[in-house]
Image (cartoon, helix red, strand yellow):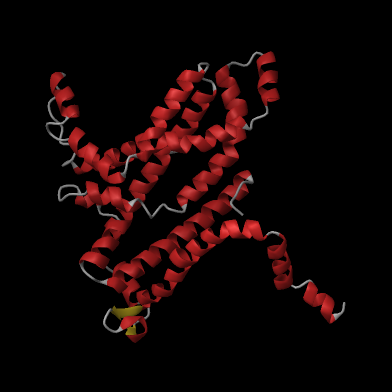
Amino acid sequence: MSESGLRKRSPWNQFKRSVRRNWVLYLFILPTFVYLVIFHYWPLYGVQIAFRNFKPAKGIWGSDWVGLKHFRKFLGSYYVKDLFRNTIVLSVYQLLASFPFPILLAILLNYCVSNKLRKVTQMVTYAPYFISTVVLVGMLMVFLANDGIFNQILGKLGLGPIAFLSDAGKFRHIYVWSHIWQRTGYNAVIYIAALAGVDPSLHEAAIVDGANKAQRAWHIDIPSILPTAIILLIMSTGNILSVGFEKVYLMQNDLNQNVSEIISTYVYKVGLLNAQYSLSTAIGLFNNIINVAILLTVNKIADKLSGTSLL
């Protein structure tokens, strides 16, 4: 092939031709591209402070290079085991407890006979998602206080007050089940959409064969939405060490800190409160590397077992 022909088929030339033909579509994705570059890729430049003894007065390039010093300091500290244990236990508990509820809600709504009841139920379960984390934790503080509504109800039943907020053993349960209450309706939306794509002829054939709703849900609906569920599960495992910082930090107190101190809250305290910027960056980078490794591992396992994966 001639040199001019190779130039015409080069990736850059093909891209330019595509832009000229579809410039309106590229214009639509331009804001997203700019956002990703500014807020997600450009900040990666600062990750190098994890390998430096960063001093704000000297700047990034003026700070001394220390290699893996901060990683060794974190991994060799006496609190690293507690941080990893608290983070993994809380994250896995949340993942396993919250995973089936959106699927169950979507299936129940799919078989709901009354359209009005379906809409009301979906609106009621979806609405908590719009409650901010600060407001949600404030509600928990009010409802679960010693004189809160839950303890008042327990008092009427003669069960006495329960120290919900000061008992470290109850922290994880409060965190996870409030998360389930807040996110189940929102997470069910994608499963409702997946169920809408199930071939109606499958249900018609099952009804002719005498299958009830439970059998149709088990043999038709669940297998149909299983690939979607697996993809969402894989994506969730990629954040297994990145439990939400805000809610944990707001619910944290001196009495439950032995179970509520996780990696994200520790990074905040080390980086912003103690001004150890390099150490906090090293911990965050290490945390992200572990998350990526877990994501790739779970993705590979899911691909081998079910044939469904992200790639």
Q: Residue at x 20, y 51 (%)?
A: 257
Q: Position of residue 196 (x, y in %)?
A: 60, 30
User: Residue 64, image x and y in percent?
Assistant: 32, 85
Near-viewer residue (61 or 23): 23
Q: Residue at x 29, y 62 (%)?
A: 267
Does residue 158 appear anywhere in the picture? no
Above or below, 100 relative to 302: above
Evaluate whether residue 233 shows in this view.
yes
Toward which corner of the image does residue 27 lie, by quadrant? Answer: bottom right
Res 68 quadrant in image: bottom left
* Residue appearing at x 78%, y 77% in the figure: 7
**Vertical position of residue 281 compared to residue 143: above or below:** below
Q: Residue furthest right?
A: 1
Q: How many marks?
A: 0
Q: State the quadrant of the C terminus.
A: bottom right
Q: Is residue 69 left or right of residue 259?
A: right
- On the picture, is 17 further left or further right than 223? right
- Between residue 143 and residue 122, name the one nearer to us: 122
In the rendered image, residue 251, in percent from the top left (x then y), is placed at 23, 46
- Residue 140, compared with residue 6, is above or below; it is above
Closer-to-camera residue (14/74) = 14
Classify the position of the N terminus by image quarter: bottom right
Say above or below: 11 vs 224: below
Residue 150 in which image quadrant: top left
- Give percent across and percent down for residue 147: 12, 31
Q: Residue at x 67, y 24 (%)?
A: 200
